[in-house]
Amino acid sequence: MLKQCEGSHAVAEAVALCRPEVICAYPISPQTHIVEGLGEMVKSGDLTDCEFINVESEFAAMSVAIGSSATGARTYTATASQGLLFMVEAVYNASGLGLPIVMTVANRAIGAPINIWNDHSDSLSQRDCGWIQLFAESNQEALDLHIQAFKLAEELSLPVMVCMDGFILTHAYERVDMPTQAQVDAFLPPYEPRQVLDPADPVSIGAMVGPEAFMEVRYLAHAKQMQALERIPQLAEEFKQVFGRECGGLVRTYCTEDAETIVIAMGSVLGTIKDTVDEMRAAGHKIGVLGITSFRPFPLLAVAAALKNCKRFVVLEKSLAVGIGGIVATNVRMAVTGMGLKGYTVVAGLGGRAITVKALTGLFDKAGRDELELLTFLDLDWNAVNKQLEREKQTRRSGPAAEAMLRDLGTVASKIA
Amino acid sequence: MPLQPVKFYQTGTFTVGNRLLAPEDRSVQANMQRTNSLNSGHRACQGCGEALGARYAIDAAMNASNRQLIAANATGCLEVFSTPYPETSWQIPWIHSLFGNAAAVATGIAAAIKVKRQKGQSGDVRVVAQGGDGGTTDIGFGCLSGMFERNDDVLYICYDNGGYMNTGVQRSSATPPAARTATTMPLGPEPGNPFGQGKFVPAIAMAHEIPYVATATVADLRDLEHKVTKAMGLRGARYIHILVPCPLGWGTASHDTIRMARLAKETGIFPVFSAEYGEIKSALAIRRPLPVEEYLRPQKRYAHLFGKSPAVATIARIQAQADKNIRKYGLLEKEVR
């Protein structure tokens, strides 16, 4: 059914259609509306046979999720930013225990300086935690990916993070096609774990494993993600059969066949990039787009296949591997090893900095002429940065720099170039 | 011949020959049908108070729950010595997740069971969480308080040996004053653990006004069984804090574990009581009041108090704390149960 609603609300409804049995909630912007929506549905009786637990921290949220999932309940939670970092120990534990928890990460920057707006630093900091990470481009995709996520998680006995851009998606009102309960039931069978905490068949879960088997256990975690590489495209196909629309998969290409330049990105910024590409193609530029939906497992072969005919690629990412440059870019470079492509890393949109068509057009134009720096920080205020660097050169003092820079900038205005 | 009342404490304990009791009054451990939930063959040290406490507590909980029990365990000695992969000593469904989240994991289990019961997919399965004092009073405290505050249907059992024994005897917030640990060495002007620090979690649990809070020791095992049974008869958040001497960390002989626990209680160092909804309901009376020195002297962690010039003032401070416990919990008054 078509409806106009907030992204968070769409996700809450989709999660409810998946018949979750335990939901843990701890508020953190910009994820909060999702669990608020689910809490309301449980309280009103629209979502039955479901326990909604207001926990005292994100660490507790993931820990409660571990307990309920290990007892055989379909379990969901949502978080963002600092919340994800606060639960990290339990995040690794959930994947190590093979518990198919589904969690929305409403992507948000990580402090200090504290910042509530969107970038991908939170999820990408957890790229090695053993969870599958799927990135949504639109609210429709966010909604649909959650339905796929439960199926994928439970089939592979692995937790799945559905990542959606905080505010840009979570708080945006868009038209979505909300599936029916019958459709979701046809796609997603009930959760039937092979091992649960059950007095009828007592098992010990979470034993200490020494050097004699630890490597093997870790390898199996990797092997499962490799299986996910095969399963994710199949699930997208099965999804299409039931719901009649494309969603998910490993990567998504746009105008790449004849493209000399391919821009690679994740999440909602793909929309802006495609608009830019449309305009540039109309002006004769041979440019295309590769959207990465599955960041973990990382689809090395699919990325290489999409880039096989281009001359150069530009990875535009909302994350920064401090001290080296890009995180997504590093992964892409692994995929194109030996292909002789020129590659550019663009760090953009950190902490909610707007990414505009104007800025992208200039950027891609420069890339097309191979005049781009290998690492570019899009729309960086060099004036503010250089002032601070100069100040630090003159007096060496430890401590945070953010406040000094804000003083230089004066009244804070949103930075839209 | 006039009727002679049976004295149940001839041996100085509650030890009662089971043959003197009616079958329904006999201990869970004395029953041939006991579950051996924590089975033999585990790797605890000789004389481990925690292994003894856990064995009694979990068997009693199994008995009280009609063997429908799931346990969540914090990281620590109990976890390490009971489940060295691929072995396990647990005869019950058991999960270890992390050091600081046993209470929250248990909340999750209880929530799952509640939904499964609604759906007719599960019977009345009960949940216990357990951990040492580090996993309870320090790193697991947030999750514990959250579980209490929500009144989740979980019995949390803390086995308190007064320190991080698994990692090599470091101080926890349950380490008593003056005690030597690897991080509170008997050096400087105030040797050992400082006075005026630490917390007594049973009192904090009571402040949550949960249905049941009790303390126990491995000296009074019938009392421990009774309290676990009582706790399992109630719903909501329940907390039992068991003093479990640690031969390694305390520097005591393996065969003195139960004696040390008894001395802790008889000196007033460790008050043994129960409370319901934040109100004290009972306290185990001290039978033969003893000075704290009797408790301190056999322990190497207090050896620095008994050198060439005994630390009289420090011992007096510990005595004052014990006296305060005696006053506060009415430990010299006639027992009410």
Image (spheres, coloured by chain):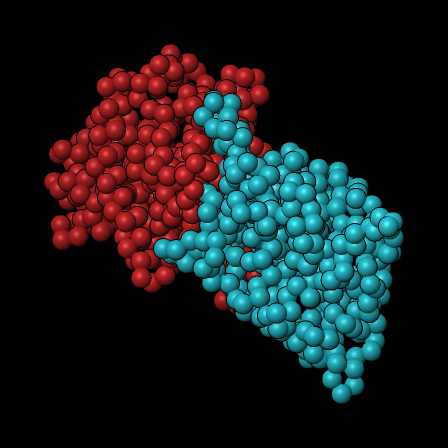
- In front of the other: B333 or B172: B333
Residue A249, image x and y in percent? 25, 32
Which quarter shows the C terminus of chain B? top right
Q: Residue furthest top?
A: A1
The residue drawn where x is 21% and y is 37% is: A230
- B209 over B286 or under it: above or below: above
Q: Residue furthest front?
A: B1
Residue A8, image x and y in percent? 47, 26
Would residue A222 be found to the left or right of residue A70 on screen?
Answer: left
Q: Quadrant of residue B47?
A: bottom right
The residue drawn where x is 65% and y is 36% is: B233
Q: Quadrant of residue A187?
A: top left
- In front of the other: A228 or B311: B311
Q: Which chain is cyan?
A: B
- Say if residue A352 shows up in the picture: no
Q: Quadrant of residue A240?
A: top left
- A301 over A48 or under it: above or below: below
Q: Residue furthest bottom?
A: B308
Would residue A205 be found to the left or right of residue B172 on screen?
Answer: left
The residue drawn where x is 41% and y is 20% is: A17
Q: Which chain is red?
A: A
Residue A147, image x and y in percent? 36, 26
Would residue B253 be found to the left or right of residue A261 on screen?
Answer: right
Number of on-image labels: 0
Residue A88, image x and y in percent? 46, 48
- In front of the other: B118 or A191: B118
- Say if residue B33 shows up in the picture: yes
- In front of the other: B265 or A115: B265
The residue drawn where x is 56% and y is 53% is: B55
- A79 over A320 or under it: above or below: above
